[in-house]
Amino acid sequence: MIFLRVAIPSPLRRLFDYLPLEPSLLQETQPLNEQEYLPGMRLTVPFGRRQLVAVLVEVVTKTEIDPSKLKPIINVLDETPPQPKFILDLALWSAQYYQHPLGDALLQSLPVHLRKGEPCERVHEFLLHAVDGAESLIGTRARKQLEAYQLIKLHSMGISSDALKAELGSTAAVKTLLEKGAIEKRHRPHIAKHPKEPLREPAKVLNCEQQVAVDAVNNQQGFKAFLLDGITGSGKTEVYLQVIEKVLREGKQALVLVPEIGLTPQTVSRFKARFNVDVVYMHSNMSDKQRFHAWLKARDGDAQIVIGTRSAIFTPLANPGIIIIDEEHDQSFKQQEGYRYSARDLSVVRAHGEDIPVILGSATPSLESLHNAKAGRYHYLTIDRRAADALPPVVELLDIKAAELTSGLSQPLISAIENHLNDGNQVLIFLNRRGFAPSLSCHNCGWIAPCKRCDARLTLHQKPPHLHCHHCNSQKPIPRNCQDCGSTELNAQGIGTERVEQTLTQLFSQWPIWRIDRDSTSRKNAMQEIIDEINKDEPGILLGTQMLAKGHHFAKVSLVAILEADGGLFSADFRGMERTAQLITQVSGRAGREQILGNVIIQTHQSEHPLLQTLVNGGYREFALNELTNRQQAALPPFNYIAIIRAEASTAGRAETFLQLAKQTPSIEQVSLFGPFPAPMEKKAGAFRSHLVLQSNKRPLLQQFLSQFCLLLEHHPLANKVRWSIDVDPYDMF
Ligand code: ADP
Ligand code: ZN
Ligand code: ZN
């Protein structure tokens, strides 16, 4: 007697036992014997009143449930598991580590097509073959079947069902013939591609530091994690390319992960321009079908380079050679809702399991990775010079304490912009706030237009005119009167990108202004069109939010201006400083990437602030090393491990009660619980939110505690009145 232990997409953190397929006459599929059930196969199972696609995790001979109460599965969807055992194990490990329900985690590791239960076949992957002498199985009266059988028999190398359909007009007989055993489906033989020269264009001659990095990775046999810490424009991508070249020559594949908005056509074209191989990419703007095909090509070894965003970490590779995480500090590698895994951290787990090297690259490495490098767990590689003789930009702090500002622009900055434009260059202006103004307020009484569903102000937008909550997305028309005193004197407070754009258009009417933020790029291809304009290298002004900060290479930008550096200096979040330093450094790094020397002007009211001083005088690395010391003293990550339980409910106080009750679990030594606290933004989208923070200096202890704690939360009396989630290694505390 065997039982099938399966993972089901349900919020419950457990597996479910089923009986194997019933040997019923009505069943279309033949029952399988014990050895034919392989972990990873997809099944359909009855669950309550529904039928769900589930994944087989284990075949067992004992169950804790009375076997007479177990139901048989409905169907087996795969002949062989669609993903290799290794990816299944990675997904299981990840579900456990991030305390996420297994079924959901396993299904999320698969392409959407497969989650829906569609066949895992490529077009013409299988061919139909006739079984010799099977006429007797068909019977003489089944004319259509005989006709189909004869036709298939004519094709001694097999025929695809599409081709057969074209000849017969229908393939209805095929199913019956398969069932009768008169014909069979066989894999189309894989025709190995001839190894060809992988280089399409010659590789660049590396400078010393690049060469050291490439040699270190290329001489590595088996697993090792490398941290490639190279300043902006230092040629990290060239290092990746030359490492990949070796991987390709060995007939292996490379998996490259990039931040969410880093996967631009430019990134892809750099890889395609260099290599003569199949490059596929995977990101959220592709259709499910396109992603599925890319996934299959990666799995079957038909694509040699796979470039993708976060979820591509679960893409199977037939011949894994290397994993590269570009801009490893980027927050988009951590999924921020639902299944909160970190693709960066999983990449190290995966590389270890597949025994291949992994490179984490960044100009502003995360403190976690720097800490690992300092502790000797990662091999630390640095590039401190820009490639191709470009010089690092000259950075200036511009104190604007008493200055008069025009939409956030000081007079010295306006003059500098003008000079750079007159020299025929481009200027990049960074303001991390979209919309026209961050709030609308009453001149008479000080009332500020609030979001009714959040503890937040509404942002004023002019294109089109409306008030918009950036937290819950609710929108409303701009009121004529103050809702407290009725005055009509309502003013826009502060600056957003729309407002700066308006002013720049007046000040610099003869030059083009390209605004890049979520609003201006929401239309499909809009971002690409703007970038194409910028890359014509005509003088003009790029104005935008952090979308501009990431990985772009604009040859003509000679001046970068940061309008307000102060917002990030006083964040309540323990990663606030790190994020601000990364953002300032990355934005600054867009200046002077080729022949022209770059300038950076940072406007601030806090020119003496230690963060800004360190960044300007010592650079990101000095900042990061100082900040690591601070984290150590405060016992914060990476010197300590954290998980947050976030709970929310529509009634005030309920989430807190939920966490308060949960907190009474027997604790484990060396795991501390803090809270529950109201979330930094307590009310959001109509829900009241509360946090509980768990901390330990021993990761396994925290893990052990969390798994018990999760079960407790699941069975909590308030569990279905509260929405709650667990975030292990949270990126932020919001
Ligand atoms: P990063 O990824 O570190 O920001 P890039 O790889 O984009 O830097 O390199 C910046 C520029 O320098 C690119 O135009 C690239 O083609 C060029 N470059 C990189 N390495 C070399 C090299 N060894 N010789 C000449 N040019 C190089
Ligand atoms: Zn008022
Ligand atoms: Zn809101």
Image: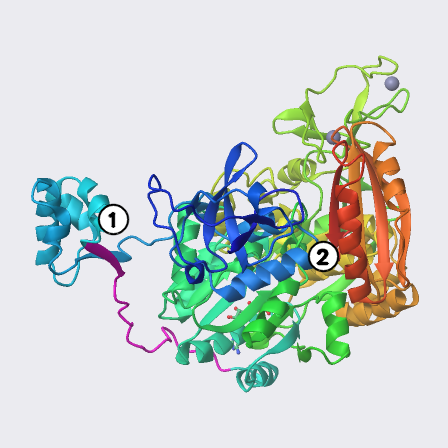
The reply to whether the magenta stretch includes residue 85 is: no
The part of the chain drawn in magenta is 183-205
Taking the spot 74% from the left edge, 72% from the top edge, the residue there is 370
Q: Residue at x 89, y 46 (%)?
A: 663
Label 2 vs label 1, nearer the camera: 1
Question: What amino acid is at disc 2?
Answer: Leu
Q: Is residue 262 left or right of residue 397?
A: left
In the picture, the disc for residue 179 is 1
| Front in this rendered view, residue 93 or 76 | 76
Circle number at residue 140: none
Q: Quadrant of residue 377?
A: bottom right
Mark 1 surroundings: few (<14), some (14-19) or many (≥20) residues within 10 A: few
State the SS at label 1: helix
- Residue 1 at x, y = what percent? 51, 56
Q: Which residue is mark 2?
A: 583
Q: Does residue 435 appear to the left or right of 673 in the view shown? A: left
Above or below: residue 95 compared with residue 217 = above
Report how far apart the C-alphas of labels 2 and 1 lie in the structure. Answer: 62 Å
